[in-house]
Amino acid sequence: MAINLQKGQTIDLRKNDHGDAIHDLSTVTIGLGWDVRKQEGGFFSKLFGNSQDAEYDLDAIAFLLDANGKVANLGKTMRTSDGRNVGLHEGDVIFFNSMRHPSGHIWLTGDNRTGAGDGDDEQIIVKLNSLDQRYQRIIFVVSIYQGQRNNQHFGLIENAFIRAIDTNGKEITRYSLSGDATLNGMCSMVFAEVYRKDDSWKFRALGEPYQTDSFVEILKKYM
């Protein structure tokens, strides 16, 4: 049975409460999901449209940190098909414009723009057993694309979760939260981290909200 964590709690991903090694971490899926709370609108809301019904685009991001707690390789700049210069390509930040790490040991599966449906809305796959020793921690972030401009925030998100699934498809742990007034105006969330400890990997529920809708602002803490 998966262990449900509260904010700040930590578990060993490989072992159970008795210290037995039971989970295969050769390929771990970090799954993220959410629902947008349905808003009741009055006559004028229906007449002119309700911004709460707009499409929410939540993006999953991962920062790979070294022993100093920093992102050592910020990657390079590339030119997109529409002529824009985009940084952080092929570095230690996994996001929508750089979905696969150069090592091939961590990647983002895709971008779900609505959160519709059951199960994970986005997934980051990590081969923890193969990850180079220079990577000691992985931070998992979720940001609402253009959340500030569209007045979209985690106070309007419910049933949000992050979970870890082992190679055999067994859910190891889950951390859930639903939006409340304390998350109003918060457009990004540092959901959780995994880190090396005693020849294993630990998972810690963080739940740290930020007003910014740009994960780059959060990344600055780790540069």
Image: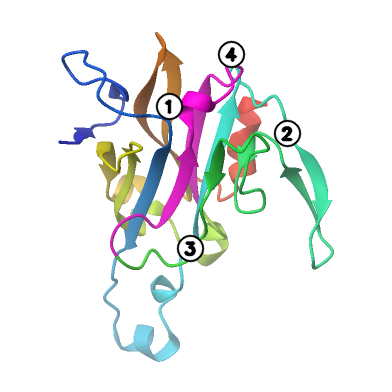
Residue range in magenta is 118-143
Residue 104 rendering spot, x and y as whole percentages = 61, 38
Q: Residues within 10 Å of mark 4 (few under 14, many from 20)?
A: few
Identify the mark at residue 151; answer none if there is no mark: 3
Report the mark closest to the observer, 3 or 1. Answer: 1
Please name the residue shown 30% across and 57% down the image.
Answer: 119
Q: Which amino acid lies under the numbered mark 2 shown in the image of this protein? A: Leu
Outermost residue, top side: 198
Q: Which amino acid lies under the numbered mark 4 shown in the image of this protein? A: Ala
Question: Measured along the vertical axis of the image, is residue 56 above or below residue 32?
Answer: below
Q: Residues within 10 Å of mark 2 (few under 14, many from 20)?
A: some
Q: What distance separates the C-alpha of mark 3 from that of mark 1?
A: 31 Å
Q: Residues within 10 Å of mark 3 (few under 14, many from 20)?
A: some
Label 4 sits on residue = 67
Identify the mark at residue 194; answer none if there is no mark: 1
Whether pointer 1 and pointer 2 mark residues with C-beta atoms closer than 8 Å, the reply is no
Q: Is residue 122 magenta?
A: yes
Please name the residue shown 51% across and 60% down the image.
Answer: 111
Q: Which amino acid lies under the numbered mark 1 shown in the image of this protein? A: Val
Label 2 sits on residue = 74
**Image quadrant where one finds the N terminus:** top left
Q: What kind of element bears circle 4?
A: loop
Residue nearest the observer in this picture, 186 or 132: 132
Residue 55 rendering spot, x and y as whole percentages = 46, 71
Give whichever of discs 1 and 2 has the lower sequence position. Answer: 2
Q: What kind of element bears circle 2?
A: loop
Left-right relation of 140 to 31? right
